[in-house]
């Protein structure tokens, strides 16, 4: 089975712009979770989507949003970018059942100038 | 509250055993995980343990869980230079779907 894929792998944006990141889960997985990784804050949970519905949400401002499509692919959008949004954005897929082992993609590294 | 703590750095000699420790605060943990991150890469799942288990062994990896003390450890036997990476422990909480709470990560340095 193919693993979790994320595109693009690298992005450079300027303050005020918006960005969309994409994640394709492992085939058959219905849950996609998004995380932000920074040196200062570590790994922080953004949100989780299951069957096209946001099922859980972390403590991030409304500038961070996401969606999931019927094929379980997910996108994450950040509007009005700030310098502090520079980070590695990781998505993880799982079956969405109780056991919920999450498998991570390689990440998208976003640099905001 | 939700908090996971790890020591930040561990240095061992090639061939020795490594033990990476983790403590957590939430007693509603369902599963506890160990992930490995190499430079510039995502997180690789190493192993996981259900919260009602004490121990799990998987080849060179041994996970010990002390639920009373909320303490988790990962032992890597015969540590190799390729094991040099950052190791994260993480917990999932009952009712908190899709969310893992991560420690800060332990950097393992393996000296030849």
Image (cartoon, coloured by chain):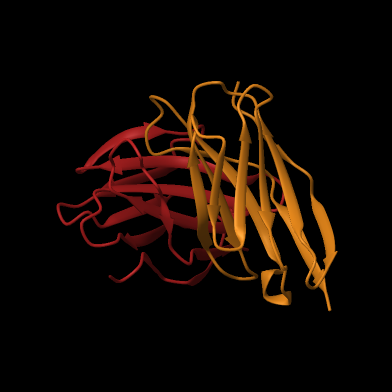
Q: Is residue A87 left or right of residue B7?
A: left
Question: Please, is residue B2 above or below residue A1 in the view?
Answer: above
Q: Is residue A1 left or right of residue A104?
A: left
Could you tell me residue B63's position as x and y percent? 60, 46
Q: Most extreme residue toward the bottom, as rendered?
A: B112
The colour with which the image depicts chain B is orange
Residue B58 seen in the current view: yes
Q: Residue B5 versus residue B82: which sits nearer the camera? A: B82
Could you tell me residue B61's position as x and y percent? 60, 57
Residue lying at 55% horizontally and 63% vertically, measured from the top left: B59
Residue lying at 57% horizontally and 41% vertically, measured from the top left: B55
Residue lying at 67% horizontally and 75% vertically, measured from the top left: B82
Residue lying at 41% horizontally and 56% vertically, measured from the top left: A103
Could you tell me residue A56's position as x and y percent? 37, 32
Q: Residue A48 versus residue B80: which sits nearer the camera? A: B80
The colour with which the image depicts chain A is red
Which of the 4 quarters of the picture holds residue A54?
top left
Could you tell me residue B41's position as x and y percent? 56, 69
Question: Please, is residue B81 above or below residue B24 in the view?
Answer: below
Q: Quadrant of the N terminus of chain A?
A: bottom left
Which of the 4 quarters of the picture holds residue A15?
bottom right
Which of the 4 quarters of the picture holds residue B9?
bottom right
Q: Is residue A34 left or right of residue B74?
A: left
Q: Quadrant of the C terminus of chain A?
A: bottom right
Residue A82 seen in the current view: no
């Amino acid at each position: 089975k193919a693993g979790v894929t994320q595109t693009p792998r690298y992005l450079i944006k300027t303050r005020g712009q918006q960005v969309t990141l994409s994640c394709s889960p492992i085939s058959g997985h219905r849950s996609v979770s998004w995380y932000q990784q920074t040196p200062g804050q570590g790994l922080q949970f953004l949100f989780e989507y299951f069957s096209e519905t946001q099922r859980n949400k972390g403590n991030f401002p409304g500038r961070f949003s996401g969606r999931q499509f019927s094929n379980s692919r997910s996108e994450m959008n950040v509007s009005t970018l700030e310098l502090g949004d520079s980070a590695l954005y990781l998505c993880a897929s799982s079956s969405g059942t109780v056991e919920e082992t999450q498998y991570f993609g390689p990440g998208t590294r976003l640099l905001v100038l | 509250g939700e908090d996971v703590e790890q020591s930040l750095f561990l240095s061992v000699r090639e061939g020795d055993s490594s033990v990476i420790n983790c403590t957590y605060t939430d007693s509603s943990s369902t599963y506890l995980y160990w992930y490995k991150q190499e430079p510039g890469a995502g997180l690789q799942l190493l192993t996981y343990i259900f919260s009602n288990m004490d121990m799990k062994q998987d080849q060179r990896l041994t996970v010990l869980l002390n639920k009373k003390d909320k303490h988790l450890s990962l032992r890597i036997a015969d540590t190799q230079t390729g094991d040099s990476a950052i190791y994260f422990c993480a917990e999932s909480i009952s009712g908190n779907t899709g969310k893992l709470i991560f420690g800060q990560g332990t950097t393992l340095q393996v000296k030849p």
